[in-house]
Each structure stands twice: as C-alpha cells, then as structure tokens.
Image: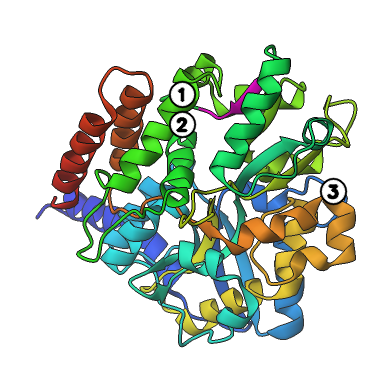
Amino acid sequence: MKPVKFLVTVVLLMVIALPLVAGGRSQQADGPTRVTLGYNPFLADSFTDAPPPIDVMRAELARLHPDIELEYYTMPQDMLEALVIWMTSRDTTVDIYGIDEPWVTQFGRAGWALPLNDRIPELEQRLQPAGLDTFSYDGNRIGIPFWGSVTGLFYRTDILEQYGFDAPETIDDMIEIIVTVLADRPEIAGLLWPGARSGDSLNMFYATLLYAFGGQYRGADGQFLFDSPESIAAVQAMRDTIEQGLSPRAVQNLERRESRQRFVAGEAIFSWDNADIITWLDNPERSEVAGRWDLMPFPTVPGGRPVSVTGGFAFAANPFSTKVDAAVKVLDVISQRPVQKGFALAWGPVQYYRDLYDDPEVQAYNANVEKLSPLVAIAINRPPSQNYAELAGMMREEIHSAITGTRSVADAMANLSRRAAVLERR
C-alpha cells in the first residue's frame, strides 16, 4: 500500500473509532466516573422558575454519588435513527439515553436496553405500575419514566348540575345526559373527540373505548384482537356518536388541538382529551369554562375497564456501556422523589412517582394536579409493537374508514387484524 493511502486509511479509522473510545472510558484518569446521558435539548430548560431538570439530576447525583459526574449529550433531532445505529453497532457514545414509549418493544426485543428489575429493586415501591409497565418488555423494566401524559374525560359541571345529573358512571349514563341536554340546547356539542386520521389521538381514543367495552389489544396467543367483538363494538360506538348526533360530524376531521379548543370555548358538554390542559383550564384569560369543569376516567359499559391512555419518555441504560454500574446508579437517582419532583416543578405533570401529586409544592406549581392521580393509576400504553409507527398508521387508516362510513366497521377491523398480523411476522 502506498504511504499516502495508508496514512489516509489510518486517519479515517481513527475518526470512526473516536466516539467509541471517548464513550468507552470507564473513568477519568484523575477524577470521577463520567456517565453520559443523551437526550434532546429540553433537559436544560425550565418552563417555570424552578431549576431545569438537568440541574436537579446533577445536584442529587452529587449528593448521593459524588464519585459520578453526569455529562449531558444533546442528541440529534432524529433520536430514534441515531440510537438504532448506535445500538446496532454496540456504540458507547451514551451510557443512558431517552426512549419514547412507542420504541419500547423494538428496543426490548433487540436487547438494546438494560433490564433494571434486579438492579433497582425499589422501583416497584417508588413508581406507579402504569409508568413502569409502559416502559417494560417481556417482564423487564427497561426504562425510568420521567415525563408523560394521560387522557381522561372532561365535563361541564355547571351543565350537569343544571339538568340534575351526577358525573356519568357508564357510557349509557353519558348518552342519557347528552340526549337530555341537546334536546334543550341543540347548539352545543355532546361529546368531542379527535377523529382526524393524522396524529395518534384517534388510536388513543380507540384504545379508551376498546377497554371500556371489555376488550384488550392482544389475546393469550399474543395475536392482536382488532377484530374481536369488543373491538368492533368500540369502533361502532365511535361511529354511532356521529351518526346519532351525540358528537358533531366534524369530529371525524378534528385534530386534538381543535377538539380541545371547542371545549375550552364552552361549546361542549364532554370532551375526551389529554389531561395537560388542567394547569390552565381555570385561567379566565385562556378558558371560557373556568371553575365550571371537572375531569374523570372515561366511563365504560358494564364489565368494561376504565383506562387512561399514556405515553411519554423514560431513560434507559445502554447495555453495551463500559460504565453500566455507574449508569444504573444515575438511573436509581432519577427514579427517586427529588428528581421526579424536579420534573414536575420545571415541566409540569405527568410523572409516575407514588403520591407525588399530594406534595403541596407540586400542587402550587401545577393547578388541579390532584385530579391526575385516578388517571395515572389506570393508565395503559398504546399497542406494543416492534413496528409501532407502521402499525399506528394502519390503525388510523382502518379506524378512520370505519367512523366515516367508507367501509363497514366489521370489514375495517378485519382488514386491520390481517394487516397487523402480517406486520408482526416480519
């Protein structure tokens, strides 16, 4: 080989290997062990006067483990693509990384996230099952949740009181309320929900009704149950709300933002939505229903299960890291109350630390946060799949065709079941 060509080859190899070498140092020559955490830039931001989460994490780590230093690595915009490349090549650029809820099955099946069950046995006592289950695969806890969302049913307390109703316990109760009120006030919407084909809100509302009608995502054999009687009944109920005038026909094209705007403007009795608006719904400068609303789990049919659909982010440990023990200690600190509370103060809910919303300071920073506890306790994730992005697209396509009448509900859900089975066999 010519000297110049040889030199170029050596330089290229050194450039490629540099992240591996830099990430692979288990300890600084004369200082603490450096653990690198990869996430987007928001960890350094606070939306209140509370310290940003990265500062809280570092302060707690310094208090509990002064021999560990936390380095914050700002991830590329497409975190998933970067992480897939790194994990496939067993890269050690980051020791801990942020993971989105839809990625859990993919990362868990591939062995790209370190199981934490035995390494942090206190997790079960600290965090609600909903949060841990959302970031688990095959029984392994692979993520420490730190921020997320839950859904619920918003309703107008003044309207229910005016017409002599309590909060509905069943779907039939809710229908009775809507029919009674609309007979007197036809200009108002009964139940708002985001039925647009874009975004994941349609799938999340479907999940709410699937469990409300006694269904579930998968059967004992692991196969999806999109064409089960309960699933068909759930989608039929979505379509019926439109056909029977319980929901305005416009819901089939409403994004979540548009749906919530109508409720906030005082134009509906009920609205299924993400609970993140609770912190400002009583602000008269932003809301026309201040002091005249409440939040509850979505009602069910007899035998159904009330659920709140969750999502969000967690931190996971890179199993290929050369500093696994130190990384686990960092995750242990993140799972404890001070850091979880730090996220609640700086970013707002949702966190899954037990009894966090009973904290007076958390309540002071987050109006109405005490309403979240019943929703967090019953939260479920979206359908787990190694190919979630593709599955979610299929679900939106078929469910939307059913609620708009393009295809019968039974045909749409049978088609979804077939397509999902093919996808899962890949």
Residue holding disc 2: 199
Q: Residues within 10 Å of mark 3 (few under 14, many from 20)?
A: some
From which residue to which does the magenta span run?
Answer: 189-194
The residue under the point 19% across, 34% down is: 415
Q: Are marks 1 and 3 in contact (CB under 8 Å)?
A: no
Q: Is residue 213 above or below residue 282?
A: below
Residue denoted by label 3: 367
The overriding secondary structure of the stretch rendered in magenta is strand
Color encoding of the figure: rainbow
- Give the number of the mark in front: 1 or 2: 1
Secondary-structure class at tag 1: loop
Q: Position of residue 112 (x, y in %)?
A: 34, 66
The residue nearer to you, when weighing 241 against 47, is: 241
CA separation in Å, label 1 and label 3 = 30 Å
Compute the Cα span from label 1 to label 2. 7 Å
The quadrant of the picture occupied by the N terminus is: bottom left
Q: Residue 22 appears at what percent x and percent y?
A: 45, 67
Residue at 69 percent across and 72 percent down: it is: 354
Residue 180 shows in the view = yes
The residue to which callout 1 is attached is 196
Q: Nearer the viewer, residue 285 or 146?
A: 285
Q: Is residue 31 left or right of residue 222?
A: right
> Badges 1 and 2: C-beta atoms under 8 Å apart?
yes
Q: Is residue 190 magenta?
A: yes
Query: What's under tag 1, amino acid-wise?
Result: Ala
Label located before the other in sequence (1 or 3): 1
Say whether residue 90 is visible: no
Q: Residues within 10 Å of mark 1 (few under 14, many from 20)?
A: many
